[in-house]
Image (spheres, rainbow, N blue to C red):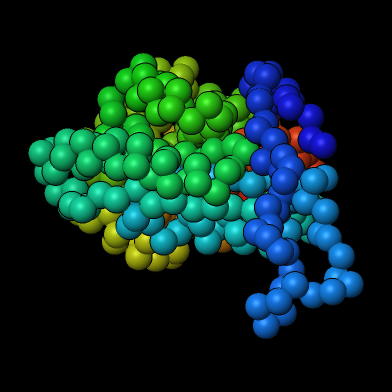
Amino acid sequence: MRNATITGALSGETIALPDVNAPPMPALASPGVIQDGVKIDGFGEIGSGQGYADVRSFRRKFGLLIPATNTSMEHELWSIIKGNQGLDGVGLHTANVVTPKPKLETEEDLLEYKRQFLGGLEAALDQALLAQPEYLIMGMSLEHIISGIDGIRASMKDIEAKSNLHWATWHDAISAALGKFKAKRIGLLTPFDKLGNENATRMFEDLGFEVVSSVGFSCANALHIAHVPDWAKEKAIFEALATDKNDLDAIVQCGTNMSLINVAEKMEPMIRMPILGINAVTFWYALRENGFDMPLTGAGRLLKEH
């Protein structure tokens, strides 16, 4: 029987873990195991009174909430799980946040996207909870649609209260990650436009970091973020951000639909500073909070070193 509570390694908070394997698990309808519609004599009982764990997610079942337009984050998280034997028994249950109008061309589009996303988040949470996850991961950075850390925290506090579960959020995760590298001067790489980057800059400044420079790809459609090619991200990092003039401590990437783990693996040895992509960092936070403290490969320095 798993302990009812653990202490988050990064937050220091007491994390309540629901007993998702409480007996009877699995509950079997009478007469039990059947063949051709008839109870099999001599098969015996599975013994659900002791409670069996989820066969694939027997160590931790994470609920992942992402926009329905997002094709990157789940892929990156599964690649980390599958690439590290120490994560055997860790599983994801993904629920999509429906945002019918993913266009992001104007300030009015952004406000409408915010309304749709926060409304859809509650419905996605209801869906995710059907799988009885033990911990939740917020698969979106809110800083480009909500201005300031206070607004972001207030929005998350409302939705967290509906689940009675702990969450890994981007603003908590990146604060912890930058702290591990003692980084203060950062550069931002995002799929956002000018307004989105201004909002992101404000969040990081609210968190106590200096945003020296920001590069945004100005994606006009949330779906299209996943189509920004890696060579363009590499060029932005190498030529615009990781310069002697900027003198950065770290590069931070926002936008969960913009894959970065391959870029980070390639570029970090070249520029000799951490590249902290949102998907890897948020998953790192969730894993470390839940006691998975082993070095992890394939997703950048943070997961290997901290």
Residue 5 x/y as whole percent = 73, 25
Q: Is residue 183 above or below residue 144?
A: above
Lateral position of residue 110 relative to residue 173, left or right: left
Q: Residue at x 28, y 54 (%)?
A: 222
Residue 17 seen by the camera: yes
Residue under the point 48% across and 30% down: 163
Residue occupying the point 33% across, 57% down: 69
x and y percentages locating residue 73 in the rendered image: 48, 54
Q: Is residue 171 left or right of residue 110?
A: right
- Front residue of this view, candidates 140 and 147: 140
Residue positioned 79% across, 75% down in the render: 40
Residue 197 visible in the displayed image: no
Q: Say which quarter of the image contains residue 262.
A: bottom right
Residue that protrudes farthest toward the bottom in the picture: 36
Q: Quadrant of the N terminus?
A: top right
Q: Quadrant of residue 198?
A: top left
Q: Please give left or right for residue 235 compared with residue 273 in the image.
A: left
Please name whichever residue, 95 or 220, is drawn nearer the observer in this view of the structure.
95
Residue 255 % position (x, y): 39, 46
Tally of numbered discs: 0
Q: Which residue is nearer to you in this view: 236 or 207?
A: 207
| Image quadrant containing the C terminus | top right
The foreground one among 57 and 213 is: 57
